[in-house]
Amino acid sequence: MALLVGVGLTILASLRGDNSTAGASTAPLLAATQAISREDALAEAPMATAAPEAALPGPLSTRAPEPLLMPAATQIGPADVPTGYPQTPEGALAQLASIDQVAMESGSLDGVRQVISSWAAPGGPSTESWSGVRGMASLLSAMGLPADAGGAASILVHPAMGLIKGTVGDAFAVVCVDFDFTVTAERTSRIAIADCQRMQWLGGRWVIGPGLEPAQPPSVWPGTDAAIDAGYQELRNA
């Protein structure tokens, strides 16, 4: 059990990445527009914090968090990611949940790279820099598996809670999803892993926008007091 928890926390640390540059200025050398500076300020604003142990399964709260109604996908997009979400903050959150879910459930570095190469705007995360790629690499390494786990491991990713950090206009949003992450090899390990991304409306769909990945939210077990205190809302189908 200690080994399984260790693997889970390794995944968590890798997906959250090294945020030592999260507060660094991303303003270009040339004069930027007000909209761009507002986007950077929103992305870099600090999030609530929680102890790493809060990501492990824990007692559920008796409080009723406000539900966040999620629109349904209407089609399948590149890399088999569900899409067709509306140009709303809820649509941006639903698209991020689908991107992360398909990427991590692929169980392979190639699968994760295919997803991000199809769903990042120019200047956004790359097949080398994206936190999802780092997370998958650490997961497979921790379990002693090759770059393509094949049938050696089962990875299930369920978007359970989310929050809308903020928007700039109707084409930019920073949204966060708190996932119930289950990995089964010889044993099953469960942990909460959260992800925040800049989402930009581009070409009729939401994609992960350009710039540094935003300050990351706390990964807390869905439905707990810690999750509600962090501002997460329960995700429900609209």
Image (cartoon, rainbow, N blue to C red):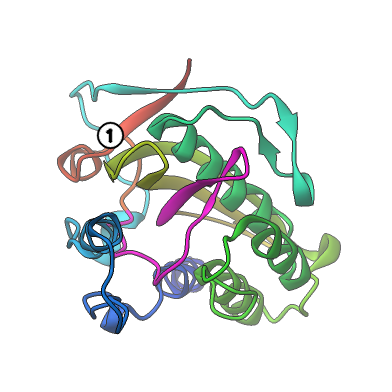
Q: Secondary structure at mark 1?
A: loop
How far from the left and from the top, in percent, is residue 42? Answer: 23, 56
Give percent across and percent down for residue 222.
35, 40
Residue 208 is at least partly visible in this image: yes
Disc 1 crowd, CA 10 A, few/some/many (<14, 14-19, 20+):
few
Extreme right residue here?
A: 150
- Report whether residue 193 is seen: no
Viewer-side residue, 52 vs 34: 34
> Which residue is depicted at the point 29% across and 82% down?
21
Q: How many marks?
A: 1
Residue 47 placement (x, y as % from top left): 20, 58
In the image, taking residue 124 as reference, residue 172 lies left or right, namely left
As drawn, 101 above or below 110: above
In the image, residue 49 lies at what x, y percent? 18, 60
Give me the residue at 36% from left, 45% from top: 173
| Snapshot quadrant of residue 61 | top left
| Pointer 1 residue | 60
Q: Residue lying farthest front? A: 31
Q: Which residues are magenta?
A: 195-219
